[in-house]
């Protein structure tokens, strides 16, 4: 029995956690035996203050699930000794002894191509073949044992034209599992129904995609070379792109579906409209959602003063749309809009490296901006880290923004998404936010493949 990091254990078995277990117990340590044939965890009962071990093994679909629970012991050391004995015993059992009888279908296979190579998305090909994305491939593999495909086209789209949208869904799946939700994907829409200790909410995932011409070819986004071009891109072009996606989903009235009825409904959106666009677009969404711009200046004492200004419309070329998504008829049925710049292949690669997947020659650096808690600053903080270096920590949910609808029929309790930043419009037009201490806005990940594993370890430990 060997120790296992929490991030590795979560990558393999977090999807098996029941919400109630997180309230009644505190996990203390994690283990594997026989090259991860079985996993184990020692947990403390928070009520009785005693300890027990849980053994996990793969069911018929390849999912790590609990197959044995030891008795409760007064000390962690005794519980860990019992866990070792049971892990060693169960590792010798045949695979069939791990099956639980409720496996209804085979696991999905995301990676075996289902179409001609010429139709495969270039990022899918890189994910399945390139050494520099091997960590992402490794951390996605356990997910596919748990993932359901109610509409029957996930794999085809993941491999071809819908790669970005389907990867965004996998990212959300990982976020909600990290938060210990029981995730249901029984119905094709909405995409997720998440049940936890504080209640249940539904989520419809969507992406902002590249503009296409009449022949279906991509139209390049407008230039962002000058400050004026960037300002127009953020204040006019991107709100129209967000608006097109959000209003088309609004028209489908997901709140009327049985699985979403009477629950908070969240629209989860990410921008894939053009190369590198997501680095800038986090600041374009709030003005469109609430119909306000916020201008700032410093007073005579050097204090930041923010003034809200109502926006009527957004215009780009011949196209004009009304601002204020939450003011649209029917939008009161959308409790909040979730937004992140993190649902990309780079995120999966970083999390995969942290969990020990993929080539051991990989060295990843991450450079970006994060929320600045100085209330008198309008500039974000900058950061540059070596992934997995000393003190480096990353979660699936970091960087997630929740824009609450002030008119929501079913408001979302912020405690239901504890790792996210929560933003609300105040009555005076200013924004109120509760933001985690570490909250990245966006980043660029660079991948270096070292000549040897030893060189890679040296670079990571040096943090450079």
Image (cartoon, rainbow, N blue to C red):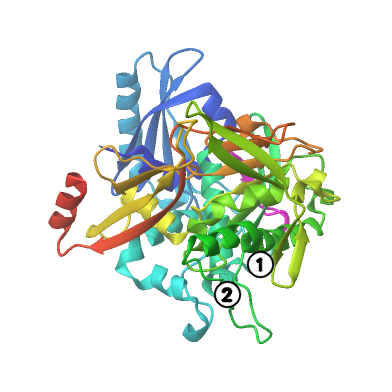
Q: Quick check: 154 left or right of 214?
A: left
The residue beneath circle 2 is 161
Q: Nearer the viewer, residue 451 or 360?
A: 451
Q: Position of residue 458 (x, y in %)?
A: 14, 50
Confirm whether residue 100 shows in the render. Answer: yes
| Label 1 neighbour load within 10 Å: few <14, some 14-19, many 20+ | few
**Which residue is labeled 1 in the image?**
152
Residue at left offset 30%, top offset 50%: 356
Q: Is residue 326 left or right of residue 203?
A: right
Identify the secondary structure beneath mark 1.
Answer: loop
Task: Give the quarter of the image for residue 211.
Answer: bottom right
**What residue is at 48 percent from the left and 32 percent from the top?**
376
Name the residue: 57% across, 33% down: 305
Vertically, is 276 above or below 335? below
Q: Position of residue 407 (x, y in %)?
A: 80, 38
Q: What SS does tag 2 mark?
A: loop
Q: Residues within 10 Å of mark 2 (few under 14, many from 20)?
A: some
Q: Residue 335 location in percent, x, y?
A: 74, 41
* Visible residue check, residue 420: no
Q: CA distance from mark 1 to mark 2?
A: 15 Å
Question: Is the stretch drawn in magenta largely helix, strand or loop?
Answer: loop
Q: Which segment is the magenta one?
A: 181-192
- Is 384 in the magenta? no
Pick whichever, 171 or 364, lies toward us. 364
Image coordinates for residue 222, horizontal then vertical, percent: 56, 71
Choose between 256 and 463: the one closer to the eye. Answer: 463
**Nearer the camera: disc 1 or disc 2:** 2
| Left-right relation of 248 to 51 | right
1 or 2: tag closer to the N-terminus: 1
């Amino acid at each position: 029995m060997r120790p296992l990091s929490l991030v590795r254990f979560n990558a393999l078995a977090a999807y098996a956690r029941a919400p109630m277990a997180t309230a009644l117990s505190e996990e203390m340590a994690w283990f594997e035996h026989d090259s991860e044939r079985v996993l184990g965890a020692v947990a403390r009962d928070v009520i009785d203050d005693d300890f027990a071990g849980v053994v996990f093994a793969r069911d018929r679909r390849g999912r790590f699930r609990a197959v044995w629970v030891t008795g409760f012991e007064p000390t962690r050391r005794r519980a860990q000794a019992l866990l070792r004995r049971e892990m060693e015993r169960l590792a010798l059992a045949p695979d069939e002894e791990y099956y639980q009888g409720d496996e209804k279908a085979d696991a999905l296979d995301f990676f075996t191509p289902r179409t001609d190579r010429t139709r495969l998305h270039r990022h899918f090909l890189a994910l399945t073949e390139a050494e520099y994305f091997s960590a992402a491939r490794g951390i996605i593999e356990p997910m596919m044992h748990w993932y359901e495909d109610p509409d029957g086209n996930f794999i085809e789209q993941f491999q071809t034209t819908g790669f970005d949208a389907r990867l965004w869904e996998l990212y959300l799946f990982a976020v909600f599992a990290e938060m210990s939700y029981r995730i249901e994907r029984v119905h094709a829409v909405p995409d997720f129904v998440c049940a936890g200790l504080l209640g249940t909410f539904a989520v419809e995932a969507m992406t902002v995609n590249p503009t296409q011409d009449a022949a279906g070819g991509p139209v390049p986004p407008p230039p962002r070379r000058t400050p004026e071009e960037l300002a127009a891109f953020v204040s006019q072009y991107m709100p129209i792109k967000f608006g097109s996606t959000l209003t088309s989903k609004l028209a489908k009235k997901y709140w009327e579906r049985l699985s979403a009825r009477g629950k908070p409904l969240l629209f989860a959106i990410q921008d894939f409209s053009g190369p590198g666009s997501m680095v800038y677009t986090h600041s374009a969404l709030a003005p469109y959602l609430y119909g306000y711009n916020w201008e700032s200046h410093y007073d005579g004492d050097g204090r930041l003063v923010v003034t809200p200004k109502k926006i009527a419309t957004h215009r780009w070329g011949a196209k004009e749309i009304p601002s204020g998504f939450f003011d649209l008829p029917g939008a009161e049925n959308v409790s909040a809009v979730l937004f992140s710049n993190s649902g990309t292949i780079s995120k999966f690669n970083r999390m995969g490296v942290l969990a020990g997947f993929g080539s051991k020659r990989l060295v990843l650096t991450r450079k970006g901006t994060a929320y600045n808690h100085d209330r008198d600053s309008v500039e974000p903080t900058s950061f540059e880290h070596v992934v997995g270096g000393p003190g480096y920590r990353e979660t699936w949910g970091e960087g997630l923004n929740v824009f609450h609808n002030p008119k929501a029929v079913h408001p979302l309790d912020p405690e239901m998404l504890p790792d996210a930043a929560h933003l609300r419009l105040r009555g005076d037009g200013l924004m109120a936010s509760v933001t985690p201490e570490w909250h990245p806005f966006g980043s660029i990940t660079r991948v270096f493949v070292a000549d040897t594993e030893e060189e890679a370890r040296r670079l990571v430990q040096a943090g450079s």
